[in-house]
Image (spheres, coloured by chain):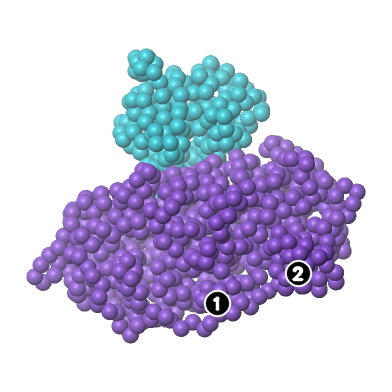
Chain colours: A cyan, B purple
Amino acid sequence: MKNQPKIGVLRFLGTNCDQDIWEACLATNLQPEWVWYQDHFEPSNFDAFIVPGGFSYGDYLRSGALAAKAPSMKDLRMAADKGIPIVGICNGFQILCEMNLLPGVLMKNRDGKFIDEWVDLEVCSESPYSSAKKVRYPIAHGDGRYFVTNEELKNLQDQDQVWLRYFDNPNGSTFDIAGVKTKNVFGLMPHPERALFDWMGGSDGQSFFEGFLK
Amino acid sequence: MSDMELKDKLKTYRISQSEYEKINEVLGRPPEGVEWALFSALWSEHCSYKSSRVHLKNLFSKSKRVLQSFGENAGVIDLDQGEKVAFKMESHNHPSFIEPYQGAATGVGGILRDIFTMGARPIALANYLCFGNPKAHRMSRLVEGVVAGISGYGNCVGVPTITGQTEFHSSYDTNILVNALAVGYFGAKDPVVTSVASGEGNLVVYVGAKTGRDGVHGASMASESFDESSESKRPTVQIGDPFFEKLLIESCLEVIRKDLVVAIQDMGAAGITSSSFEMASKGDVGFEIHLDEVPLRDPSMGPEEILLSESQERMLLVCTPENLKPIQEVFSRWGLDAHPIGKVISERRVILHWHKEVISDLDPHVLTENAPMYERPFKPWAYPFKKSELSLSLEIKELKSTLMSQVKSAMGTSRRWIYRQYDQRVGAKTARDCDSSLSVQRLPESGRALSLVLGCRPYMMRLDAFLGGADSIFEPALQMAVKGFEPLAVTDCLNFGNPEKSEIMSEFVASLKGMSQACESLVSPIISGNVSFYNETEGKNITSTPSTGLVGLKENLDLPKDHFQNSGDEIFLVRLPLVSTWGLAGEAQSLKEFVGEVDFSKASKFVKAWTQFAAKEGGSLSTRLVGKYGLGYALFRMSTEDLGARVQFGEWAQTDRDWVKENLYEVLVSAPQGHLNVQSLQTHFGNDVKVWKLGESVPGQLEFVNQDRSQSALTTDVWLAYETGWREHFEKLS
């Protein structure tokens, strides 16, 4: 186990889950450090990165599209190339897809409306961030419908990249997909930072953040 | 000016003949140029509270916890241990009826600005909505638009919507109500700032979005009744930009917490006019403002439009000259401009410049302190529907089908379709969400619990304005008390019809009296709020609706649950018999009557006893305040799909119709077998209350047992009806 890994928390104009990620890191013995969208940084100074959720740039144009072009993202791409773990949550997942660091796109929910609710997820592929077979996190998104073509889906399955699947698909995602991964880049729509303590309604998020210690 | 010209002018600026005479008197001459616009805005009902001020000053508004109250952007209360909260509720009824999405969205934006201008970080939103009959003209579209507007703005700006109340009644068919409430948090190190300007030579700085033509004359629009031309007022509705607001929150809190500002106020109703005149007036200083320096979206705008624009996401702040640069650096980092447009002068005058010309030079008190105050006629309250006993003409089908129709009705069905669209958890403080009977957040520094609950049952207001007013406080206070919270303070949003009609004014006065007495008995002061009159369309007034928001505190997060926990849990009823009515079921059959009266001392004692009991017992109990549709409906709401209840008929409910009767106030409580008993509850709650054991929780059934027969429903059936009821009323919205 690493001693207090340093987590770069990326911030853009309009990001609104940044503080929650910060608090979650502190609560799980991680050392968070802000990465401002205009700033360049040295990837190897960090043990991992989290791209938090929220509405970067108000979701104007297309969710995640503007943040994907921010100056800090050049360095994040380098971090990805170097194999440093990067996790995108909700809007962070959308941003990583926009950067093509993860396959697929996230479209408007099937019923066109924002959805906030707790969901049960099947963990389909191994990662440091979830050792259980089933986890329960809240979702809160308007553009959470994960879409890939049949061919891309087959690729994902062949490479064991389907990470999390909804038991009860809330938004029309292809193959009920809630999260995907590559070797070191992870994206998921649900919010583990909102499931950290029992008083929040569930604490499955603890083991998610403990994954950064591994 | 000819009589004809004067008449036109008064009409354009919505100023009455007597107000015109008063303007002449305070100025010593007739108004000129932009002064017309200034008086129109600041003397409007919306800004001046001219019909309500005389009554508002009698409201109970003090306790040792109150740090800021009326007169500031929001009230602030002290939670001890260094923590404080600011909160306020405001209406956006008129704009939301004209343009539901933007009307509701900008209502949320506006109330958030009232909170973060004080230096508090917004942590929660709530909304109180009254819609007409679901089948009324445009109603589906209004419901969809309002909910989408709240969701679109609140979710993007990153403040969770944690509770709400949604009412349906035909009195809102042509005038819906959209009331938004926001709560802000101060940690031990966070300063509270005000809008009191000071310091000769200090700068007046404009921050946020550029000024456009949107919302010009909005304040005076909100101060008159609707007519068939209201649809054409769409251009006076403002457009919101939640992304911009998010940037404004972060930048304003940063400059406040770096101690760079002297005073700050948002530009709400009547925009730059109200903020500049009010800031100067409160500080007993003057402003010199260069309107030609105001950043504009459309450079062809004239001074009058600039003064009256209600463009959103703008603030006015006062700072020392040396702090301008650091302030500009903060705003620029967040992608915003901070632009000086004037300075503070020692003499109490607001001098407005337009290029090289002085276009107005007035003492701000003339517009704020000297605004007209009306003592509109009203009658003493005479309890029009109070009876010596309840008539027995309520028709009731057998209990199962009664219950089924209640849980499917517009008033009884699940609101999940609404709150599922709200982000209820951003900020990671939410301990109980919209699904719960009470919303709860965890205070970040102390770990204590803060609850927020809305009040006002319009059907109680239709029954009796005094009773309804008192109930607007006691009902939400009990909601939190049965979970162990102490109600600390209140904000209100007084939605009424035309105050020039004495029957409306009488209801206003009576309900305020009921509210104020209830607040005093609980020592929960009213610390902020807003009045919305003229909720009238073509002579038809809404139900008088004094909505409220209460904030409560508990030492920890060990809260009684909402639902039965295990099969065999014992179910008790604790009733304080004050008032009985056939309530919502009676109203549907035009049975408008009640017996008894509110005893403020007994009701407040009941609240306190519950706070104490529920806090001590915590999560081993399940509790529910019995409300709309009475005991039967409340028992269903305590059930889960798997766990129901078997209850007996008895002294508490002797006939079928007694299960839908509404008794103010009574509470259902369940606990594991042997944990509670009638005697111990009686001892705790005293001799004013009656306590009975009704039965116990059982798997899968909701069963009402009389001597000779038993009536039951499957909990899965009732839940299905409850969850799908919405769809029956709003086919298009599911």
Please rate how many residues cluster around mark 1, counting C-alpha atoms within 10 Å: few if below 14, some from 14 to 19, many from 20: some
Q: Is residue B375 left or right of residue B517?
A: right
Q: Earlier in the sequence, mark 1 or mark 2?
A: 2
Q: Amino acid at mark 2?
A: Tyr
Dots 1, 2 in contact, CB < 8 A: no
As helix, strand or loop, the secondary structure at mark 1 comes to helix
Front residue (pair A40, A44): A40
Identify the residue shown where x is 56% and y is 59%.
B227
Q: Is residue B21 left or right of residue B510?
A: right
The chain that hosts pointer 1 is: B
Front residue (pair B228, A163): B228
Q: Point out the residue furthest to the bottom here.
A: B388
From the top left corner, tell me how far across and down residue A159 is, in percent: 37, 15
As helix, strand or loop, the secondary structure at mark 2 comes to helix
From the top left corner, tell me how far across and down residue B339 is, in percent: 78, 44
Q: Which mark is residue B502?
A: 1
Measured along the vertical axis of the image, is residue B20 above or below residue B262?
below
Q: Is residue B358 visible?
A: yes
Q: Point out the residue furthest to the left here.
A: B708
Label 2 belongs to which residue?
B20
Q: Quadrant of the N terminus of chain B?
A: bottom right
Q: Amino acid at mark 1?
A: Ser
The reply to whether label 1 and label 2 mark residues of one chain is: yes
The chain that hosts pointer 2 is: B
